[in-house]
Each structure stands twice: as C-alpha cells, then as structure tokens.
Amino acid sequence: MPEPAPTSSIALPTRRNFIAATSAAAAGLAASVETSQAFLFRRSTPLDMSELPSSWIANQGERSIQSYADYLAGLRLKYVTPMQVIESHAKKKGSVWNALPPRSMWRNMGSSLKVTDKIAAQVGSPVREVTSAYRSPAYNRRCPGAKSQSWHMKNFALDLKFATSTSRVAAAARYLRSKGVFKGGVGRYSSFIHIDTRGHNVDW
C-alpha cells in the first residue's frame, strides 16, 4: 500500500519560524537604532535656565534649548560645558537676538567642540567662556567686523577665552592641527581665540 502524500502541515512550522525570526530581527534592529539615537542625544540633567534671558527662552522654547543641551552633553566634553555654549547664543545686538543653530547644523559644532576639548587638555586649562558660537544671519550682521560668510553662521566656529594667554592657546591649536587632529581656522585676538573646523587650514 503506497504511503500517503505529505500534507501542508509539515511546511507550517517552517513558515512560522521564518516569520518569528524575521520579527525578532526587526525588533533587534529597531532597538539598535533607538540605542544609537539615545547615545547621540542622551538625556542630560535638566538645564538650569534661570540665568538665561527670559525673552530669549520664550523665543527659542524650553524644549528646543533642552534638546540642544542633551546633544552637547552627549559629546562628553571635559573642559567646556553645555551651558557655556548655550549662553553664547542667548545674546542680543541692538534689537536682534541671536538664536540656537538649526538642528541640521548641530554636528558641525560637535567637531569644533571636540577640538576645543583637546586644546584645553593641551594647555591644561578649561574653557573660561565661549564668547561666540553659532550666529544667525541677522545677528551676524550686527557683529562688528563679522564677515558676511562667517563660519559662525554655519555653526563651525567658536570664539573662546581661556585662563591663559591667547598666544599659548593659539600655539596649542596649531600644534594639534599639524598633527592632523583637525583642519580649520585658528585666529588669535588680544582677549580670545577663534577656532573652526572648516576643512582647510587658515591662520590670522
């Protein structure tokens, strides 16, 4: 007597296993993406905004300010704080307030801040003040001596004060640049130093 033909019930467990495995892989991928995003924008300690101008906070929105603080905290800098960067945006020239950088430009400042952290380590001094970082186009036009195509408007540039001479900081920046740590501008002024990561070297 011939054996009965195989039925479709034999294939069902295989199909179910495939669906289960596919679902597990998708869940794992989603978890991986969520983890990487959480690392990039990890939640920092809520920012104390009491020292920031209330009208600037109202213009920018507390949620946006905190989100940028979270991004800055995710850089894990040792010698410059998120508040020092944010304070540089909360400034006014005449009737024009500066603003936070657009989200699409956040990573530009990340590269410049990491270079700043290395410079601070090189000179053995934390950043005392970030006098200027991102500048909105309207705010940049109000800054004396600012170029119309300033790298501050692209969120690549920082003007910094350290508790040491500007000549020492500039020398440290140029040394690190010569070692390939970054490509960008180093400008020395009497009371502060300019650093940017524009992608090609220039000095003044």
Image: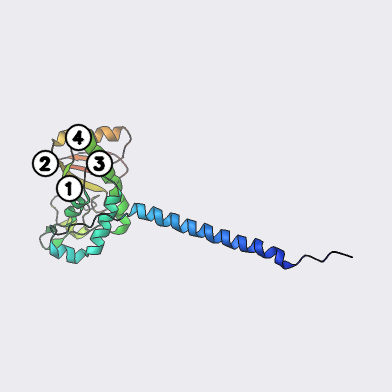
Drawn side of residue 196 relative to residue 25, left or right: left
Q: Nearer the viewer, mark 4 or mark 1?
A: 4
Q: Residues within 10 Å of mark 2 (few under 14, many from 20)?
A: few
Secondary structure beneath label 4: loop
Query: In this view, which residue lies farthest toward the right?
Result: 1
Q: Are marks 4 and 3 in contact (CB under 8 Å)?
A: no
Q: Are marks 2 and 4 in contact (CB under 8 Å)?
A: no
Q: Residues within 10 Å of mark 4 (few under 14, many from 20)?
A: few
Mark 2 or mark 4: name the one nearer the start of the chain. 4
> Mark 1: which amino acid?
Val
Secondary structure beneath label 3: helix
Q: Is residue 147 visible?
A: no
> Mark 4: which amino acid?
Gly
x then y, percent, for residue 59: 19, 66
Q: Nearer the viewer, residue 113 or 132?
A: 113
Residue at screen point 25% across, 63% down: 63
Q: Which mark is residue 117?
A: 3
> Mark 3: which amino acid?
Asp
Return the residue at label 2: 191
> Mark 2: which amino acid?
Ser
Return the residue at label 4: 124
